[in-house]
Image: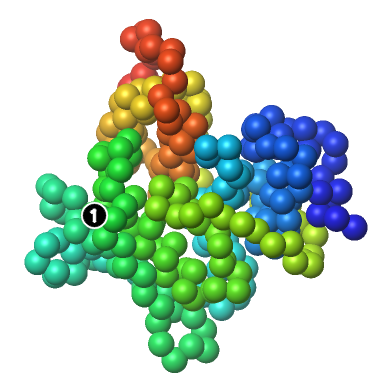
Amino acid sequence: MSAITQWTQEQTQLISSTIAPGCTADELKLFAYACQRTGLDPFSKQIYAIKRGGKLTIQAGIDGLRSIAERSGQLDGSSTEWCGDDGIWADVWLGSKPPAAAKTTIWRKGSTHPFVGVARYADYAGQGLWSKMPSAMLAKCSEALALRKAFPADMSGVYTVDEMEQAETVTVTATPAPALAPAAPAAFAGDAKIFAAGKAAIAKATTIQQLEDIAARMELRKNDLSKQQFEALLEFSLLREAELIPPAAAPSTGNDADPFADD
């Protein structure tokens, strides 16, 4: 049975219109194979199909890569550090300027050595959230690099949203795998109302400037959100930013309500 038949007609239509817009029938099948091979759930926003210049790219959020590692039963912890131009590593970035690099170390059970991923700011820096939250964005890139080193059989060819400006188009080869199991909903400890308002605001944004304004408001309300909620909003904003390049023609009305304003 092909992977695509694991989705109902209704699910396939939903994926085609929201998760993989603009994809042909063959590209949807390719995306289905990618979902099956990685075990990631598109309905939980763990994996995406995005058309760039008419070519299909398969992208996963950092939570998707973490899920693959956790599901293997071999993940044995991780840590992230940042450094400036002096090359001195610290476990928290407090500098007023973006860090020069981020380094994530992944430990895998049974391995005699850790797996390290280093991401340089000069190699990844871009517009949008990169200018607002450089340390968080760089940390996710370094973590993705380290996770692919630690779990190459599971993550080969799977790039995160944050890396896609630097990565080549992903080609996914179909391989037999168990049917995709529904992912359990994430448990968030932060303010659900603020999280939902943030997602709605990002979805309605029609320009890069609007996304940057939302990112600034997100930073102000960061303490009201859990780490998972905040990272999920970052991922969602990056995906929306990718959709808006080149920027949408519709100008901002200037009347958008602030979803992060105090009640």
> Regarding mark 1 in the picture, which secondary structure is present there?
helix
Q: Nearer the viewer, residue 236 or 262?
A: 236
Residue 214 appearing in the image: no
Q: x, y percentage for residue 1?
A: 90, 58
* Quadrant of the rendered image containing residue 263: top left
Q: Residue furthest left?
A: 86
Q: Nearer the viewer, residue 63 or 5?
A: 5
Identified at 43% across, 15% down, the residue is: 249
Identified at 61% across, 69% down, the residue is: 154
Instruction: Give the residue pinned by disc 1.
Output: 122
Drawn side of residue 204 relative to residue 25, left or right:
left
Q: Residue furthest bottom?
A: 112
Q: x, y percentage for residue 142?
A: 36, 63
Q: x, y percentage for residue 59?
A: 55, 50
Drawn side of residue 39 relative to residue 115, left or right:
right
- Relative height, residue 29 to residue 222 (above, below): below
- Relative height, residue 117 to residue 245 (above, below): below
